[in-house]
Image: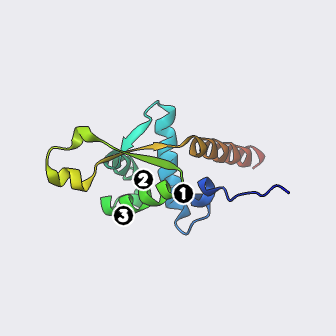
Amino acid sequence: MERFQAVTETSYLTAQNAPLYRRIMRIFFEEYEKMHFQLYKEDVLELLRTYPDYTDYTLDQLKLDLDSLTAWKNLTATQDPKRVYTIADYKNKQYRYAMTDGAVEVERLTVKLENLFIEKG
C-alpha cells in the first residue's frame, strides 16, 4: 500500500500567520517571474513595506518568518560570502534566499486558483 507524505511546501498556506507568509511568498514569486531568483532579506523587507499592512514590520520579524519558510522547504538560504567584511558579519550570516521548485509550483497554483475565483465571481 502506498503511503502519502505530508506536503510541507503548503504549510504556509494554513499557518497561523498565513496572510503574512502568503505575501512574502508572493513577493518571491513576482521577483522570480522577473528573473530575480535570489533576494536578500533587506530586499524582501523593502518590498514588503510597500504594502500598508506591513509598514511597521521589522527585519527581526522577517528573519524569523524566512526561517519558518526555509524549514517548510519553500525557500533555500545560501550564505553570501561577498557581503562578509568582518568577523561580526560572518557570525551574523548574510543569506540570499531563493524559492524552491516546489514553492514555485505552489505559488503558480495559488495564482491560478485566485484567477479561477475571480472569473467565477
Disc 1 or 3, which lies upstream in sequence?
3
Decide: few, some or many residues near mark 3? Use Cα within 10 Å; few <14, some 14-19, many ≥20.
Answer: few
Given this view, does label 1 or label 2 mark the residue nearer the observer? 1
Dot 2: element: loop
Query: Where in the figure is residue 48, as x and y percent of width and height?
Result: 40, 51
Q: Cα distance, mark 2 to mark 3?
A: 16 Å
Q: Quarter of the image containing the N terminus?
A: bottom right
Residue to which mark 2 is pinned:
51
Given this view, does label 2 or label 3 mark the residue nearer the observer? 3
Residue to which mark 1 is pinned:
72
Dot 1: element: loop
Query: Where in the figure is residue 97, as x and y percent of width and height?
Result: 41, 45
**Is residue 4 depicted above or below 100 in this figure?**
below
Q: Are marks 1 and 3 in contact (CB under 8 Å)?
A: no
Residue occupying the point 70% across, 47% down? 113
Q: Cα distance, mark 1 to mark 3?
A: 17 Å
Q: Farthest left residue? A: 86
Q: Amino acid under label 2?
A: Tyr
Residue occupying the point 22% across, 41% down? 83
Q: Cα distance, mark 1 to mark 2?
A: 24 Å
- Pick whichever, 37 or 48, lies toward us: 37
Judged left or right of residue 72, residue 65 is left
Decide: few, some or many residues near mark 1? Use Cα within 10 Å; few <14, some 14-19, many ≥20.
Answer: some
Q: Amino acid under label 3?
A: Gln
Q: Are marks 2 and 3 in contact (CB under 8 Å)?
A: no
Q: Are marks 1 and 2 in contact (CB under 8 Å)?
A: no
For residue 111, what is the image quadrant?
top right
Residue to which mark 3 is pinned:
61
